[in-house]
Image (spheres, grey):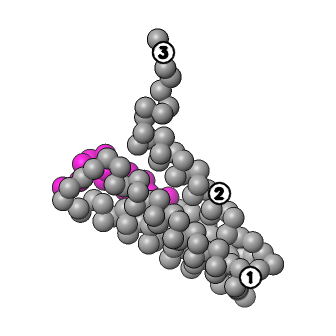
Amino acid sequence: MASREAKTGFGYHLAAYVTVNAILVWINIDMFPHQAWAQWPMIGWGIGLAFHGLTLVSTSQKQNRGLFYHLAAYMIINAVLIFINLTTMPDLLWFKYPLIIWTCMIAFHFWRVFPKYRSTNAS
């Protein structure tokens, strides 16, 4: 069974997913009512969230497993988002916004998983 910390982390990710996607749907309806695009980040992020959920039900927990699932989802989903953007709306490069935000979140995840890299070498 997953630890309390892992479940809390999933809860934070789920809350971020719901909040950010609600905002994206609102932006889509408000600014681009005739062109639906909000479902693409919702689907992509949902895949990443599903990977995260799988780490909660896996029987053997390793500290780095969640990070590598997130990293794999990050690479696959952002590649799909770039492809969708360039094939449907090449004049509006919207893929950069989820890419920038997700890159920051992955960097923070690395920082949390590998604390030895953030500690100073005090002698």
The image's mark for residue 89 is: 1
Residues at marks 1 and 3, CA–CA distance in whole angstroms? 51 Å
Seen in the image, is 90 located left or right of residue 70? Answer: right
Q: Which residue is mark 3?
A: 122
Mark closest to the chain's N terminus, 1 or 3: 1
Q: Give the position of the N terminus as an image quadrant.
A: bottom left
Please say if 94 is above or below 6: below
* Camera-side mark, 1 or 3: 3
> What residue sits right under mark 2 in the picture?
100
Rendering coords of residue 40 (x, y %):
57, 78
- Range covered by the magenta-colored residues: 1-17
Q: Residues within 10 Å of mark 1 (few under 14, many from 20)?
A: few
In space, the residues marked 3 and 2 are separated at their CA atoms by 33 Å
Coordinates of residue 71 in the picture (x, y in percent)? 47, 59
Q: Which residue is drawn at the image coordinates 31% and 47% (left, top)? A: 63
Name which residue lies at 67% across and 63% down: 97
Q: Amino acid at mark 2?
A: Ile
Badge 1 amino acid: Met
Q: Is residue 21 visible?
A: no
Query: Identity of the amino acid at label 3?
Result: Ala
Dot 1 lies on which element?
loop
Per the image, label 2 sits on a secondary structure element best described as helix
Asked if labels 2 and 3 touch by Cβ distance under 8 angstroms, the answer is no
